[in-house]
Image (cartoon, rainbow, N blue to C red):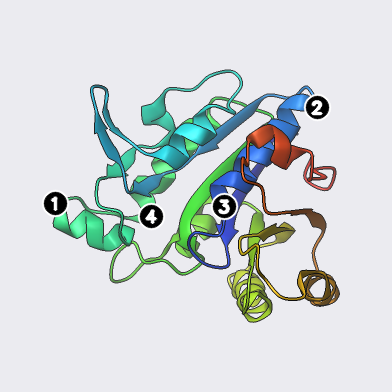
Amino acid sequence: MLKRYFVTGTDTEIGKTTIASGLLCAARRSGITTAAAKPVAAGCERTAEGLRNEDALALQAQCSPALAYELINPVALEAAIAPHIAASEEGAELSVSLLADGCQRVFASGADFTLVEGAGGWRVPLNPQQTLADLARELQVPVVMVVGMRLGCINHAILTAEAIAADGLELAGWVANLVDPEMSRPEENLATLKQLIKAPYLGFVPWLEDATAERVADCLDITPLV
């Protein structure tokens, strides 16, 4: 059975791509095919091949069989700001239907395990009427939540989990990612999250100076997802 998930986070800059790459790496290790989509990416660099986003490239590296960059990241925006603002400034239009079409093309590759990574948190706007949460609802796929472990993470995690449930989607699992190496009482915070989040716990990723997909995969248990 094909497994497809939407990866969201409790905020921006909390390691969604780091965790998504680790999940894909773990899936590859188990011998199944993988694919990924970053339907919209803001913060792209100009290259000879066109606009390229670091996160989308990291996901591409974990796709097996390989996928073309344009398939993974169909909407590439140069400014490293909120996607709807970047799109407006760059003369692009974002919509659920546009991004969903891009995701469906990735799904058509037929990989056993596919991740769609959002941008920022659950309610990031695409336009005045739609958010990335609407994309997840359109795709009707379960959600994997990345919890950025830092001060305030419990509130952010619970609110995000509640919003996912309110939108009628399943929280298939969550990962705790230590983004603040100076965080006070990370073990106690993690214990509280385990008590309050009613979804499979997929692992804790400590602060890593070199957070390669392989090292992150070592910290994860993808059994509930596959």
Q: Residue at x 54, y 36 (%)?
A: 36
Q: Is residue 6 above or below residue 61?
A: below
Q: Position of residue 127 (x, y in %)?
A: 29, 65
* Mark 2 surroundings: few (<14), some (14-19) or many (≥20) residues within 10 A: few
The mark closer to the camera, 3 or 1, is 3
Q: Is residue 216 above or below residue 72?
A: below
Q: Secondary structure at mark 3?
A: helix
In primary-sequence order, the first of circles 3 and 2 is 3
- Give the Cα separation between the discs numbered 4 and 3: 20 Å
Lateral position of residue 68 relative to residue 65, left or right: left
* Mark 1 surroundings: few (<14), some (14-19) or many (≥20) residues within 10 A: few
- Circle 3/circle 1 CB separation < 8 Å: no
Q: Secondary structure at mark 1?
A: loop
Q: Quadrant of residue 94?
A: bottom left
135 vs 89, nearest the viewer: 89
- Residue bearing mark 1: 91
**Which quadrant of the rendered structure holds the C terminus?**
top right
In primary-sequence order, the first of circles 1 and 2 is 2
Q: Secondary structure at mark 2?
A: loop
* Mark 4 surroundings: few (<14), some (14-19) or many (≥20) residues within 10 A: many
Q: Is residue 1 above or below residue 197?
A: above
Residue 96's label in the rendered image is 4
Q: Residue at x 83, y 45 (%)?
A: 221
Residue 16's label in the rendered image is 3
